[in-house]
Amino acid sequence: MKAVKRKVGKYELGRTIGSGTFAKVKFAQNMETNESVAIKIMAKSTILRHKMVDQIKREISIMKIVRHPCIVRLHEVLASQTKIYIVLELVSGGELFDRFVHQRRLSESESRRYFQQLIDAVSHCHGKGVYHRDLKPENLLLDSGANLKVLDFGLSALPKQGVELLHTTCGTPNYVAPEVLSGRGYDGAAADLWSCGVILYVLLAGHLPFDETDLPSLCSKINTAQFSCPCWFSPAATSLIHKILDPNPVTCFCRMQLLLSSFCNLDFERIKIEGIKRDPWFQKNYVPVRPRADEVVNLDDVSVVFDGIQDKFVNEESHNTDDGPLIMNAFEMITLSQGLNLSALFERRQDYVKRQTRFVSRQPAKVIISAIEAAAVSLGLKVHTRNYKTRLEGLSSNRVSQFAVVLEVFEVAPSLFMVDVRKVAGDTLEYHKFYKHLCEKIDRIIWRPKVSMPSSTLFQTMTC
């Protein structure tokens, strides 16, 4: 068996749990406290080459400023001679996106609870002068208690002194406010609330309010707010969504509108956070989530990493033996399941595939890799394999954007291997289809225990 240990300061790094163009995220364990964390790793050369120093520094500073129970917490920032390490709270409940993909849509009460937590988090950010600008279900995680956690402040903005409007067009088109698409300047708070309204609609409906195959048609529908609420929406929920998805963040009133508003109490502008919080539908069973009053924000480590790092490096250690797949330790195994019920690792439900998922096999690691490679080729994907990690690449179904998946083999016990599968690029729904097709092609190597084992027995088996 392979003994692999890589340490960064007081943290021992484990498996990769996410990756993107400029960074990868690894599971890690604090060796002093045994706390599990997630560490985002970025190469300094990449940051410098793409002139991202100011952007990364801003993202880190913002995450330290907006500490809130419904926002993923940033613990600290470290650096080696070649890399920057951002130590984050490990959120184990998966993406909110996965929850409504599985259930098609959420109940009104469940949707309301997540929406209440989202509004509390966004309200806290706005109170600190921070605008997220990329709010969508894929940037909303759930902790082990199914509470919301907002992620990814990479596109966030802090308005400059004396400047009220933002001008950078960014975000995901389906969730972006019409004034952002116009390029004429926009209020960050109003734009974030539009995205919140789209998210609420998606949770209740199970599909997007604005969804077209081409960008011009999509923009046209967003600009005029052409959408309709399904029949199962309650009148109160429908009313609130229409108040949020008003294409005019601030509308100039004409004489007729003034008369109507005075007699009918109508609004002709997008509702603000204060109005949302007063709304009867929102108020039902509302328990505000507030940050701790004694939170002290310290940005010293950010300054050290970016402003004077030459002689303040953290220790990096890596010891590898043999050429087999990585061994997954007990701490990593625990975080893969809900609580301590590790049997969830061996249950692969065909109707529920996350953006990152996994299956197990009793076949040798090399046989697993060969089967994956053969299946990928048959699906028309390019294959790159190195050290029991395989990257599959191809074009998305729209033939425009890229689609990429990484599969990595881990040894969890003698003659028992787990394959971790995660989406790197492309649409999440397309990933669901890919995973289903892949599993159909490699079904012969997937192991499904006929009798479920007690979690304690399984834990002993996996760690021996």
Image (cartoon, rainbow, N blue to C red):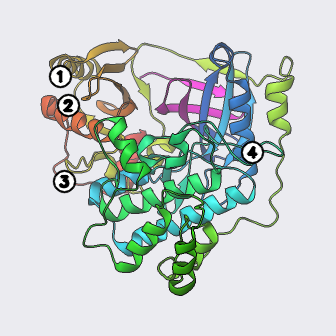
Quadrant assignment, res 289 = bottom right
How packed mark 3 is, by other alpha carbons closer than 10 Å (few <14, some 14-19, many 20 or more), is few
Q: Give amino acid for label 4.
A: Pro
* Disc on res. 379: 1
CA distance for labels 2 and 4: 46 Å
Q: Tell me: residue 373, above or below residue 231.
A: above
CA distance for labels 2 and 1: 8 Å
Could one spot residue 254 in this view of the protein? yes
Q: From the viewer's side, name the closer residue of 27 and 280.
A: 280
Q: Which x, y percent locates residue 253?
A: 59, 67
Q: Please indicate whether residue 79 sits to the left or right of residue 207 in the image.
A: right
Q: Which x, y percent locates residue 306?
A: 80, 26
* Disc on res. 63: none
Q: Which x, y percent locates residue 351?
A: 21, 50
Q: Please name the residue shown 53% across and 57% down the image.
A: 248
Q: From the viewer's side, name the closer residue of 405 and 55.
A: 55
Mark positioned earlier in the residue sequence (4 or 1): 4
* Residue on which disc 2 sits: 438
Q: Which x, y percent locates residue 156?
A: 64, 42
Mark positioned earlier in the residue sequence (3 or 1): 1
How packed mark 2 is, by other alpha carbons closer than 10 Å (few <14, some 14-19, many 20 or more), is some
Mark positioned earlier in the residue sequence (2 or 1): 1
Q: Please name the residue shown 73% across and 44% down the image.
A: 158
Q: Please name the residue shown 38% across and 72% down the image.
A: 238
**Residue depth check, mark 2 versus mark 1: number of the one nearer the observer:** 1
Mark positioned earlier in the residue sequence (2 or 4): 4
